[in-house]
Image (cartoon, rainbow, N blue to C red):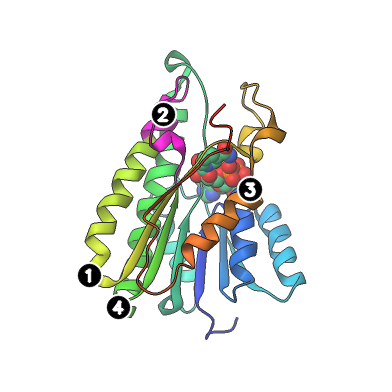
Amino acid sequence: MNNLNPIAIVTGASTGIGEQISIKLSKKNFHIVLISRSKERLEKVKDKIELFGGQCQIIVADLSKSDITSYIKKQIKTPDNIEILVNNAGIGFFDKLEDISIDDWNQQINTNLRGSFLMTQFVSPFMIKNKTGKILFVNSVAGLSPYPFASAYVASKYALRGFASSLREEFREHNIKVISVHPGAVDTPLWDKSKADFLREEMLSSEDVSDMITKAIMAPNNIVCEEIILRRTAGDF
Ligand SMILES: NC(=O)c1ccc[n+]([C@@H]2O[C@H](COP(=O)([O-])OP(=O)(O)OC[C@H]3O[C@@H](n4cnc5c(N)ncnc54)[C@H](OP(=O)(O)O)[C@@H]3O)[C@@H](O)[C@H]2O)c1
């Protein structure tokens, strides 16, 4: 690992939007820390990044577990170099209220919300010390508007927006940029088990969404793109 390269941590980096953000940030010379539960899928992303000379490491971790950040901390050799955190890992189960089990509820809240809280709490002391940093939350249009058959997911994303917005105010004095991105439906594995009949090819692509996210992260000087809504030109499904 090159200790001089700034570090970008991307959670949920094994597929979908997180994979694409990781590839794009590695092309901007960040050392990428790729985090998710699947070693096999993370290794495939690592291979893609290394193919064009990018630098990365993988950390296999389940962010829904409350004690996970001490393990992650031990794996990152130069945490002082952390410049970017992308809180992207997330899951959605789309069901009627009566069909949401307590496990489904906990998994969505613990991954989408608590995992982001834990990762942010882990990186922020380094950013505060360095007087610079960028924390991006991959939220959703479901963090801005209610949707039926998605109450647990919507609850996690509304809360995530509140968390990010409060942090933005708290971190202004430390020169840390906090960004929330709210995409509409994106064609990723998140939809593989969904009963919704949206046409996958008419969704946003993870390449396009991650392109906009990378641009927001790279905004120059004292600009912060605080909140971004990314919808299909034709509107939501
Ligand atoms: N697709 C959409 O329509 C859409 C729209 C708006 C917002 N989003 C948001 O975009 C983010 C990325 O989702 P995606 O659409 O790219 O779906 P995806 O392809 O299913 O990606 C989800 C990522 O999160 C990881 N993950 C899930 N649970 C985890 C856990 N407990 N610990 C660590 N990693 C975990 C998954 O990897 P492992 O399985 O290897 O752990 C995977 O890398 C999510 O926050 C989602 O809510 C998606």
Seen from the viewer's position, the closer of residues 12 and 143 is 143
Q: Above or below — where is 33 with respect to 227?
A: below
Question: Is the residue marked by circle 1 packed among few (<14), some (14-19), or many (20+) residues within 10 Å?
Answer: few
* Ligand 1 closer than 8 Å to label 4 CB: no
Separation of marks 1 and 2 at Cα, in angstroms: 33 Å
Disc number for residue 173: 1
| Whole-percent x, y for residue 161 in the image | 34, 44
Q: Give the amino acid type for the residue marked by disc 3 in the picture.
A: Ser
Count of numbered tags: 4
Residue extent of the magenta highlight: 139-155
* Ligand 1 closer than 8 Å to label 3 CB: yes
Q: Residue furthest top?
A: 98
Instruction: Give whichever of discs 4 and 3 has the lower sequence position.
Output: 4
| Whole-percent x, y for residue 218 in the image | 49, 68
Instruction: Give whichever of discs 2 and 4 has the lower sequence position.
Output: 4
Separation of marks 2 and 4 at Cα, in angstroms: 36 Å
Where is residue 25, by image quadrant? bottom right
Q: Is 31 placed left or right of 73 in the picture? A: right
Residue drawn at 52 percent across, 25 percent down: 94
Mark 3 lies on residue = 206
Query: Is disc 3 placed on a helix, strand or loop?
Result: helix
- Magenta stretch: includes residue 50: no
Q: Work out which quarter of the rendered image holds the C terminus and state it.
A: top right
Mark 4 lies on residue = 129
Separation of marks 4 and 1 at Cα, in angstroms: 12 Å
* Residues at circles 2 and 4 in contact by the CB criterion of under 8 Å: no
